[in-house]
Image: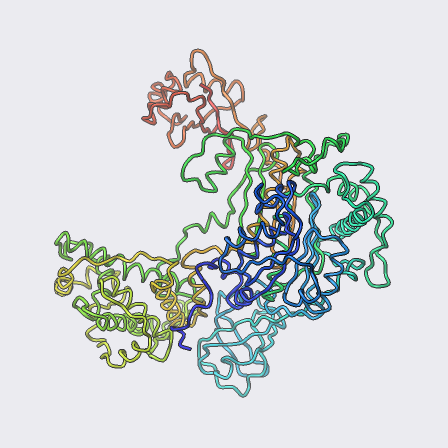
Amino acid sequence: MDALDASKLLDEELYSRQLYVLGSPAMQRIQGARVLVSGLQGLGAEVAKNLVLMGVGSLTLHDPHPTCWSDLAAQFLLSEQDLERSRAEASQELLAQLNRAVQVVVHTGDITEDLLLDFQVVVLTAAKLEEQLKVGTLCHKHGVCFLAADTRGLVGQLFCDFGEDFTVQDPTEAEPLTAAIQHISQGSPGILTLRKGANTHYFRDGDLVTFSGIEGMVELNDCDPRSIHVREDGSLEIGDTTTFSRYLRGGAITEVKRPKTVRHKSLDTALLQPHVVAQSSQEVHRAHCLHQAFCALHKFQHLHGRPPQPWDPVDAETVVGLAQDLEPLKWTEEEPLEQPLDEALVRTVALSSGGVLSPMVAMLGAVAAQEVLKAISRKFMPLDQWLYFDALDCLPEDGELLPSPEDCAPLPTQHLPAVFPETQGRGGCSSCPAPEPRLTGRYVAARCTHYLKPLLEAGTLGTRGSAKVFMPHVTEAYRAPASAAASEDAPYPVCTVRHFPSTAEHTLQWARDEFEGLFRLSAETINHHQQAHTSLADMDGPQTLTLLKPVLGVLRVRPQNWQDCVAWALGHWKLCFHYGIKQLLRHFPPNKVLEDGTPFWSGPKQCPQPLEFDTNQDMHLLYVLAAANLYAQMHGLPGSQDSTALRELLKLLPQPDPQQMAPIFASNLELASASAEFGPEQLKELNKALEFWTVGPPLKPLMFEKDDDSNFHVDFVAAAASLRCQNYGIPPVSRAQSKRIVGQIIPAIATTTAAVAGLLGLELYKVVGGPRPLSAFRHSYLHLAENYLIRYMPFAPAIQTFHHLKWTCWDRLKVPAGQPERTLELLLAHLQEQHGLRVRMLLHGPALLYSAGWSPEKQAQRLPLRVTELVQQVTGQVLAPGLRVLVLELSCEGEEEDTAFPPLHYEL
């Protein structure tokens, strides 16, 4: 199939962000999957919602139980109108509306062995243990992936059984590592040297690799995967190359991901031999105790026909006794685990297990849905095999007497009192200042610090996510990541992008600049010339010439039809990837040596090679097709998507004459001295060419749009960058990667977003539940692809000192209102008397109110002024009516350079 005519099998616009996480092969498998979710309470609804948003082919819902009031507490798909309807039927319509590409159906009968054979994955939520064992055994028998999930208050449990021989095709989220080759020796073993600046430390002994784009030692290109050995100097041994051709130049080495096999036990076996996901031995022990707690809760339910009553000490002690009587857990079938049961933990679980909380089901439902996707797509390593998650840190630490069970009964549509007794009847919020427009993360954080408000902050990137909480006077304040602050809007060096690229990102920036110059800025410049009737001599010479030369190009006349646009695009291809490279090599020959004897083309600066146009090369053709269509759009002409006809047309077109192109297509290197290079004759020639564009309608500047895959914008940038990579021997990136990088698209999936929302919701309980110590709060970081979750206590606010003064980022220096209002002189005296601060500089925002370095005359002018009078005089603004506080900044004599005094709140 022609690469240019390949049909889209996926709705890339619908799944754009998750495609960058999962990739097309995984998405194809997800779209053809059949999944059964049984149990449509809060947790089941979360699992189903995530699967529908992620685009599973078919989702079958099973839950014949009628909707009751308590279901409305955490099942967002249900409402009062659904009471008495089965949960599955009531949930089906809203789930289907989330993604019409997914078939959402309801199964009303029992779960039978024959039914299970219709599905690839079966999920049970909030099911009795007997049901889990029955369904899990049948799934294991028939090779159907099985999951069981449940939450009890602030504790969650997830079990996965993908069978005894499950192959994970793509175990990691990272793209295969690719690096440019500097040299390959002939020998046994052959030694491969990576280009300087490559991430050599990412390769590991035993990695499988393949090769592409090598000139000379072509036997390696597209060879079967070879195992490598990493030497101490970072070079790689790649096996015997003795009989291969001599290496000449170029090429890339690419990691080949290895499939991994997972062997899972059935649920009946795994109950006594639980493999748990944990980061330390302490967490493993806690998870085993939680495992026993869940088993005891199931046993209690079986014996009493009901779950334990919320905060009932008698029921809780019964659960503890049942946990103590359980058969010991085992490392192997014979060897028991020798670790004591944490009775206090089991007791707390039993006391608080009576409610279903939205943040808990959001968190565990997201992880469960991600495991379903792993089973379907065979991408990312699945859990092994149990996951226990608890947020018992949300409970108070004060050790008060337990409430009575009567005080903890869940309200009809609210489960909070069953877990947090102190929330009974609580509602409303602490009022905050009115929202301000154009809020950004840093601005919101600064406002929260200013107004002493809690801040809940979260973010996701693919299967990674984080959730953090910042409490006034308890935790440190929010600080933007240093790397993000440093890299924000940081462009690559112009010279590197134009002439000496060494990474695919450099070539993409060059291609993006090409788009802007060719199809937007040049059109705007020509339109301005038409309207103002100015000549080039009256315009900004070098900059204007840079914009216009490529657009005026080979034609020297305004294009009249599709053939003219193709001729221009072919000429520009020749300029960029053939003649332009030759011109660069005339300035910097391959053998050029610097004054110190160092070769000019060395290290990250690689000597480029000109390309020869070939209509049989898809990337060559794609560039011309995209460039011609964009050029046609700019001139209001019809374009074409027929790549076969384009190939035939290109065979008929005359090849551009390099002698004719030279005056117009001069290298950008020459434009550094444009005033000398372009004299009156050349300006006259360009003015004459430009006259052809004054006839006819204005040109249409093209604004880059990444989300329309039919407009050729991304096609042009991706093709241009790929060809540039070929020039410089840089491993290219795919079109999808190009779109992500150029479009600054953040990869995202529903599961990570839901998990982070749940983690943040758990911290919100603490924020609104009254004063809590630092030890109660948690920052969270998760990586669903690698089954990694860590929750840790945030840092306390740093204490700064200056003489006897101590403060944190949450503190303020306050100057109470005075009658009459203080003058600047009295304010400075107050700060010295009360705090021992000799003010060196005083500001209101950027406005300088006072400086100790001023002349005596200037100080004498300002010291007698009232502070409000001074602020209005300096800023030129009248203070708003009702203003109660002026926020001032100060620096003082004797302070260290990194001292940041707390803001001075001057009360009015």
Lateral position of residue 356 relative to residue 614, left or right:
right
What residue lies at 51% left-to-right and 22% top-to-bottom?
814
Question: Please, which residue is most extreme toward the top here?
Answer: 819
Marks counted in the figure total: 0
Which quadrant, please, contains the C terminus? Answer: top left
Q: Nearer the viewer, residue 329 or 123?
A: 123
Residue 327, image x and y in percent? 86, 54
Residue 907 x/y as whole percent: 47, 20
Residue 584 visible in the displayed image: no
Q: Position of residue 703 (x, y in %)?
A: 31, 56
Q: In the image, is 832 to the left or to the right of 854?
A: right
Whether 279 is drawn above or below 898: the answer is: below
Residue farthest toward the bottom in the current orientation of the protein: 243
Q: Which residue lies at the image location 46% right of the left edge and 28% below the top edge?
A: 890
Quadrant, the N terminus: bottom left
Query: Does the image show residue 24?
Result: yes
- Its colouring scheme is rainbow
Residue 623 lies, in percent from the top left, at: 33, 70
Left or right placement of residue 348 versus residue 203 in this view: right
Q: Toward the viewer: 137 or 496?
A: 137
The residue nearer to you, when weighing 804 against 53, is 53
Q: Say which quarter of the image contains residue 386.
A: bottom right
Which residue is rendered at x = 78% and y = 58% of the image? 271
- In the image, residue 291 above or below residue 634: above
* Image quarter of residue 527: bottom left
The quadrant in which residue 665 appears is bottom left
In the depicted structure, whether residue 852 falls above or below residue 352: above
